[in-house]
Image: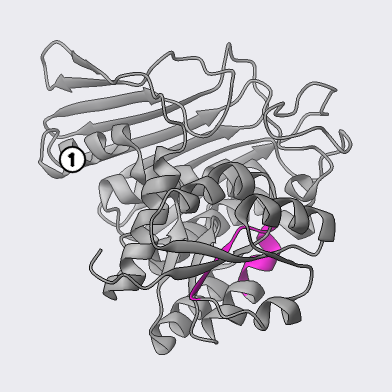
Amino acid sequence: MSNTKVISIGMIGAGWVAEHGHLPGFLSLEGVSIGAVYDPDASRAAHLAEQAGAKACSSLSEIDEIPLDAVLVCTPNHTHYELAKHFLQQGIHVLCEKPITTTAEEAGSLRRIAESSGVVLLMGFVNRYRDDIRELRSRITSGQIGDVQICEVIWRRKKGIPRPGSWFTQQKMSGGGVLIDLGSHMIDQMLFLTDAPEPVACLAGLHSRPAQEGDYSNWLGSAESVTLEVEDTAMGMIQFANGMLGRIHVSWQDDVEGDFVEIHLKGSRGSLSLRTLFGFSNQGLYKQPSLQFTPAGQEPEWFTFPPKTDVLIDFRRQAYHFVECIREAKQPDITAEDGEKAIRLIQLLYQSAHKGLVAT
């Protein structure tokens, strides 16, 4: 990076992913400091601020008094729009956790504000920075399987409800369940890997079974209750304008041996299948990621990735890219428009599921 000015970052939200993912990512960079940590829970703000060597704030008026170049918004989903807007309108760069907002209309509003303010708005689809995803994308764009005809994305957990009873499982705060949570990442992967055009039709279904003690993610924190207001499983089919078919299957609690992510693509010249795991789960099904390439009419070829020893490498890469965009006035590689496209498609899937009809 050519500019040596220290970039001051504000952490907006002091929850689990801020502490264990984003903060280590930014602290690994030279020429970056954490200027402030904001959380309405003062004790949580103080805890993270101590780790970051920053000032703790429990109100927006406090953090507005601190000169910041950029902020990271990693708060409950329903707060993303107002918080991101608050800082974008001040000319402060924003890295926003997924989903960008809970509606496509709000996402479009943030995109326009960022454009008019001339600041960076980077979407937090951190899995795009993974080595296995980069390899998969490279093979697709090189034409290895020809024109993509079918894309199937799957993320299933054995016991992975994120803190039942917390904002994750409250409809008004989250905007939905597993579809807007894990589904945000998987829909983005579908759109990113295939450069899919606009969807023309969606059909989806949602399901939730009563949560039991032990059905929650033990790596994310203890349950606050076992009551779910949202779906724990979602499945959907999507028809795109170019004829490509998409399928999504995401689940927080499922009858599987372990947690896994799979992405299957069928093209005019062959197929690709990735078996891996996103996130921080300690109960993964696969010991290491693997990629299968099957040329049309031929035997499959396997490529195995080395075991992932640095679980934070994707967060470091994301933080580096964010700061690089700020320093060099670059367009981010994951834009507000990407976030808008993902939440628009998720809205269509919810619309179909709630009405029991094909959504267009």
Residue 111 falls left or right of residue 144: right
Q: Is residue 285 above or below residue 266?
A: above
Residue drawn at x 30%, y 25% as measured from the top left: 273
Q: Nearer the viewer, residue 233 or 34?
A: 34
As drawn, is 92 to the left or to the right of 151? right
Q: Residue type at mark 1: give it.
A: Ser
How is this picture coloured? one colour
Query: Residue 8, how many percent across, how many down?
Result: 50, 70
**Magenta segment includes 77:** yes
Magenta highlight range? 69-81
What percent of the width, then of the height, locates residue 122? 42, 64
Image location of residue 295, percent across then percent down: 12, 22
- Nearest the viewer among 2 and 119 is 2
The one nearer the camera, 89 or 251, is 89
Figure check: 294 above or below 120: above
* Vertical relation: 219 (above or below) 205: above
Is 296 magenta? The answer is: no
Instruction: Give the residue drawn at x 47%, y 53%.
Output: 26
Residue 189 seen from this side: no
Camera sees residue 268: yes
Front residue of 360 and 344? 344
Q: Which residue is mark 1?
A: 138
Expressed as whole percent of the image width and height from the top left, the position of residue 353 reads 63, 48
Up-down: is 293 above or below 352?
A: above
Identified at 62% across, 81% down, the residue is 86
Q: Residues within 10 Å of mark 1 (few under 14, many from 20)?
A: few
- Residue 42 falls left or right of residue 316: right
